[in-house]
Image (cartoon, rainbow, N blue to C red):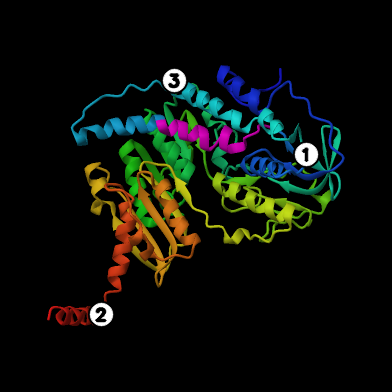
Amino acid sequence: MTEPLIAPFDEHNQRLLAHVHPDNWNNPEPAPIYDLVVIGGGTAGLVCAAGAAGLGARVALVERALLGGDCLNTGCVPSKALLRSARAVHDARAGAAVGVRTTTDVDFGAVMTRLRARRADIAHNDSAARLASLGVDVFLGQASFSGSRTIAVDGRTLRFRRAVIATGGRPSAPAIPELAGISYFTSENIFSLTSQPRHLLVIGGGPIGCEMAQAFALLGSRVTLVDSAARVLSREDEDASRIIAARLERAGVTLVTGSGGPGGPPLTSLTSAADVILVATGRMPNLEGLNLEAAGINAGPSGLEVDDHLRTSNARVYAAGDVCSSFKFTHAADAMARVVIQNALFFGRRRASALVIPWCTYTFPEVAHVGVSSGQAITIPLADVDRAIVDEDTDGFVRIHHQQGRIIGATIVAPHAGELIGHVVDVMRRGGSVGDFSAVIFPYPTVSEALRKAGDSYRRQGLTPRLRRLLEYYFRLTRR
């Protein structure tokens, strides 16, 4: 029997597969030539295909595994479904602080069943049938370049005017001896669990590692997180890292950071003590089987080589998403796909470097970031924000980095920080100033008021002693 593309093979995953890899799908007869052939049915590929077809282009999409890619099947959707269950436990534990005491009884099997059900509910958006209804020719199979303007799939040849490679990436495991010969999970299959880990070892203290460590700990597993870096979320602001480390420990996670140094427990003892191991240490591009050489397309260890217009070394072939970007996020793939549509089909000159791309780690609290962490900084602690105070959720801050007022970056540690960072992105995209937040009317009481406070703080800095003396003189004159 053929191994299922996703496990377990229950009613919910069967419903998922009926959308994203239907077993009765028949690949169509290719058109004589396509305006755009898309390789990869994840976020970038779906946006390219649906967007181009909606504009009237003749489009083909090729997917070798599951339409929807990481986001739907093994990333954003299942992880956030799991985090939603974990948040229920988190909120119940926090109830005592607001005078509500309750107990929690976690049914791990039910948690995972709900995860698979919600994923299947969303899958129709990425389905082969929906793409076909939009006018996209969907081919299920391995795509391989057979020339500079042709792609082979399932014994057929697809000729194209333009093509885009959007094959994404997959988890990569570190080359450490302790993992040799033992089984472990990655983000690709951790959501196939049906029984709760007794002791989960998470290797990697980045966003995925921290999210999963906190979630499984709240759901009742004993969790140890180990990372060779000195702190978790090492790419983030040090203050943000410190808050998340404390919250992880409060949830019951044992942190072992700086594991490469002296004094820490050997990794062998940690792996032998755990019944489930999750490796969350990085990603690598999916380039296997594409026969890039036949199309004259260059690639390196980190993925496809593209210019600022997302064009590969073959001028007719573009790329978008994880296969060519250092921003391994669904929203980044979506934004890059929109750049590709304009540049590939309409001779546009949009630049990927002009995109303002934020990211967010969905721990409790969330950590959202955009831009760089340099220049001057204005920090508003959540302890100064009324809504955070009444919600008993003051672990966090809003920090805006600027150069003479122009925003160049920000870090937000707060509930729903991923929602708040969008305000900062919008101002940055327009080349705006920190002071612009002063002019925005945020509803009261909300955590977003921290942004207004940052704007007010910046404007107050402009009130120099000399300006204040001039204003005092002005008011004296007007009082006469």
Can you say which quadrant of the picture contains the N terminus? top right
Q: Residues within 10 Å of mark 3 (few under 14, many from 20)?
A: few
Q: Is residue 234 visible?
A: no
Amino acid carrying label 2: it is Leu
Q: Is residue 71 magenta?
A: yes
- Compared to residue 380, the image places residue 232 above or below, namely above
x%, y% of residue 292? 79, 49
| Side of 48 relative to 217 (left or right) | right
Q: Element under label 1? A: loop
Label 3, label 2: how far apart the Cα atoms are: 64 Å
Camera-nearest label, 3 or 2: 2
* Mark 1 or mark 2: whose residue is earlier in sequence: 1
Residue 110's mark?
3
Label 1, label 3: how far apart the Cα atoms are: 38 Å
Residues rendered magenta in the picture: 65-84
x%, y% of residue 16? 60, 25
In the displayed orientation, state which residue is furthest to the front.
480
Instruction: Name which residue lies at 44% across and 48% down.
Output: 259
- Compared to residue 332, the image places residue 193 above or below, namely above
Instruction: Name which residue lies at 65% across and 29% down.
Output: 20
Q: Element under label 3? A: helix
- Compared to residue 121, the image places residue 281 above or below, namely below
x%, y% of residue 425? 47, 56
Residue carrying label 1: 143
Residue carrying label 2: 467
